[in-house]
Image (cartoon, rainbow, N blue to C red):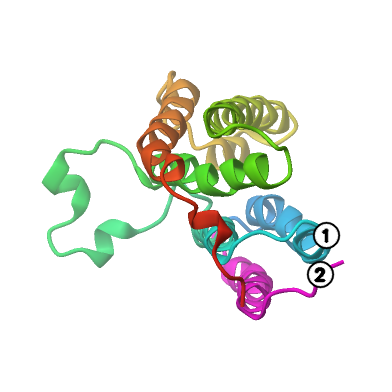
């Protein structure tokens, strides 16, 4: 096994610290722990995986960045992130939003940030062509987006109605799942040109 890159060690530490910070003062504690608990369990696995299959700091940063955004949103159970209170005039009033859009942002960012590490894994360890690695990365984003929506639906069937509504973030939109998946796919497509270009993933890890 390779030693863990110093920068990636700091990324893991930030994620580990983000877990209790996300749960602290959560408005729906049970829901928040459903969202952050798996992250806590995956931190040791990530430490092992990054040593077993080293990746560039850029790819590791993409993964850590998405997880930190997820932890941030989980504190407010996604649907209640108070971004309108943080922006003068409110984003909802400015853009005519009729629902909290933070969950949509996270799905889009997932698509963007998943592409570089998935392309790198395909190129570095799968011995794939750049075109095939890019195609598989896009399929990964679409598949994970769909599987997550199915998992979310199954989980909410076991929760009380109020908690289920807060957890799944549908907010009255019957096409919420489809829009979430579409935004993840859009993010992946927009990130594809960057993932396609150059040998950025061969950069030094330190």
The residue pinned by badge 2 equals 2
Q: Residue at x 50, y 25 (%)?
A: 177
**Circle 1/circle 2 CB separation < 8 Å:** yes
Query: Vertically, is 12 above or below 157?
Result: below
Q: Is residue 70 visible?
A: no
Q: Is residue 8 magenta?
A: yes
Q: Where, quadrant-wise, is the C terminus in this rendering?
A: bottom right
The answer to which of 163 and 90 lies nearer the viewer is: 90
Query: Vertically, is 16 above or below 41?
Result: below
Q: Is residue 152 left or right of residue 76?
A: right
Gap between marks 1 and 2 measured at Cα: 7 Å
Q: Position of residue 131 (x, y in %)?
A: 52, 28
Give the residues drawn in magenta, as a range: 1-27
Q: Is residue 184 magenta?
A: no
The chief SS type of the magenta part is helix
Circle 2: element type: loop
In the displayed orientation, state which residue is furthest to the right.
1
Residue 105, by quadrant, is top left
Q: Is residue 37 left or right of residue 145?
A: right
Circle 1: element type: helix
Q: Position of residue 144 (x, y in %)?
A: 63, 32
Label number found at residue 52: 1
Query: Vertically, is 125 above or below 50?
Result: above
Q: Residue at x 69, y 30 (%)?
A: 151
Q: Residue at x 75, y 32 (%)?
A: 158
């Amino acid at each position: 096994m390779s030693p863990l890159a110093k920068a990636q060690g700091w990324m893991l530490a930030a994620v580990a610290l983000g877990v209790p910070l996300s749960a602290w003062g959560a408005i729906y504690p049970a829901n928040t722990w459903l969202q952050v608990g798996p992250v806590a369990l995956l931190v040791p696995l990530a430490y092992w995986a990054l040593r077993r299959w080293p990746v560039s700091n850029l790819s590791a940063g993409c993964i850590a960045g998405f997880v930190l955004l997820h932890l941030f949103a989980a504190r407010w159970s996604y649907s209640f992130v108070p971004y309108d209170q943080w922006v003068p005039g409110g984003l909802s009033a400015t853009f005519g939003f009729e629902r909290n859009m933070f969950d949509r942002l996270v799905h889009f960012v997932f698509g963007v940030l998943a592409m570089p590490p998935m392309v790198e894994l395909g190129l570095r360890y799968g011995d794939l062509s750049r075109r095939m690695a890019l195609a598989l990365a896009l399929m990964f984003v679409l598949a994970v987006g769909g599987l997550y929506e199915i998992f979310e639906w199954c989980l909410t069937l076991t929760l009380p109605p109020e908690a289920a509504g807060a957890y799944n973030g549908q907010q009255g939109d019957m096409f919420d799942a489809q829009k979430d998946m579409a935004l993840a796919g859009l993010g992946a497509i927009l990130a594809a040109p960057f993932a396609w270009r150059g040998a950025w993933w061969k950069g030094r890890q330190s």
